[in-house]
Amino acid sequence: HLMCLYPFNQVSAFATDADSVKQFQAAYNGMIARKGDVTGWSMGWQTNTYARCLDGDKAHYNLQRALRHSTSYTIAMGGQGGCYYNLFDAHSPFQIDGNYGCTSGVAEMLLQSYDDVITILPALPSSWKNGSVKGLKAQGNYTVDEEWSEGKATAVRITNNQDVDRQVSVRYDNKVATYDISANATLDIDLSAGLPTGVNKVVNVPVSTIKTIYDLSGRRVNKAEKGVYIINGQKVVF
């Protein structure tokens, strides 16, 4: 039932309307009830879901348990989680889902873009006070590098990997700004003083030029109603 939280985006921590906020809180309460004492694929799952809940410390707790040395090298399906000396996930005996899931969870802790907004350090654990990461991928074919110090983002580099000029929306510390970014160009943002105000424009596409229409989840639709869509590679507000 929590697939609506991850990997889908039907329930979001960034929701603002009353019903969506209640749905998110219910999903988060469901996560807390599980207490994180799981193994294998479920460890990776909870790392991702806690990251989507913006709870970096609980996501980190799951990651720590996934990386502890297993106490069993025989088939034991409960209470014997962690990993072996070769870092294979111990369910046991082995579940690659745990390895892939926890790797995904780390990425979700540092960057999220499922709602078509690149969110910087959404679930940074308190123990990761200083650091940097390069080469994270964001939806829309962007590459993102991040730097942070004392738990606060200091710089972000966003590369547009498409051959078209676009606009990119960036979220940090509950603020969103939109910036122009040229084809195959890199946008450098100094976050040491918070998120700077970007350029916020609505792109008007003549109806006669419309060829393909997609919603923000990447699904093709027949017509655009009220909302935000991607038309001919451009974000359009109706």
Image (cartoon, grey):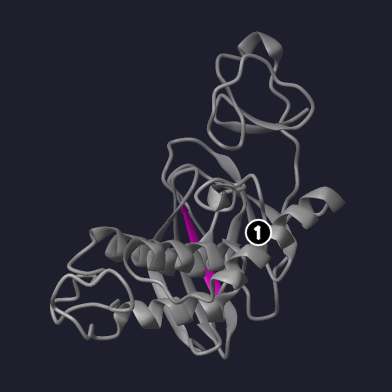
Describe residue 100's horizontal placement relative to residue 201 as left or right.
left
Rate crowding at label 1 as few (under 14), some (14 to 19) or many (20 or more) other CA atoms within 10 Å.
many
Q: Position of residue 83 (x, y in %)?
A: 23, 77
Q: Which one is nearer the viewer's eye here, 171 or 56?
A: 56
- Quarter holding the C terminus is top right
Residue range (magenta)? 155-159
Q: Amino acid at mark 1?
A: Ala
For disc 1, the marked residue is 27
Q: Position of residue 228 (x, y in %)?
A: 71, 34
Question: In this view, which residue lies farthest toward the top?
Answer: 208
Residue at (57% x, 62% y) in the render: 52
- Is there any visible trace of residue 143 in the rendered image? yes
Is residue 99 a member of the stretch shown in magenta?
no
Q: Which one is nearer the viewer's eye here, 194 or 29?
A: 29
- Is there any visible trace of residue 122 in the rendered image? no
Looking at the rendering, which quadrant does residue 121 occupy? bottom right
Image: 85 above or below 185: below
Residue at (13% x, 78% y) in the render: 73
Image: 148 above or below 222: below
Looking at the rendering, which quadrant does residue 192 occupy? bottom right
Q: Which one is nearer the viewer's eye here, 106 or 214?
A: 106
Image: 157 above or below 2: below
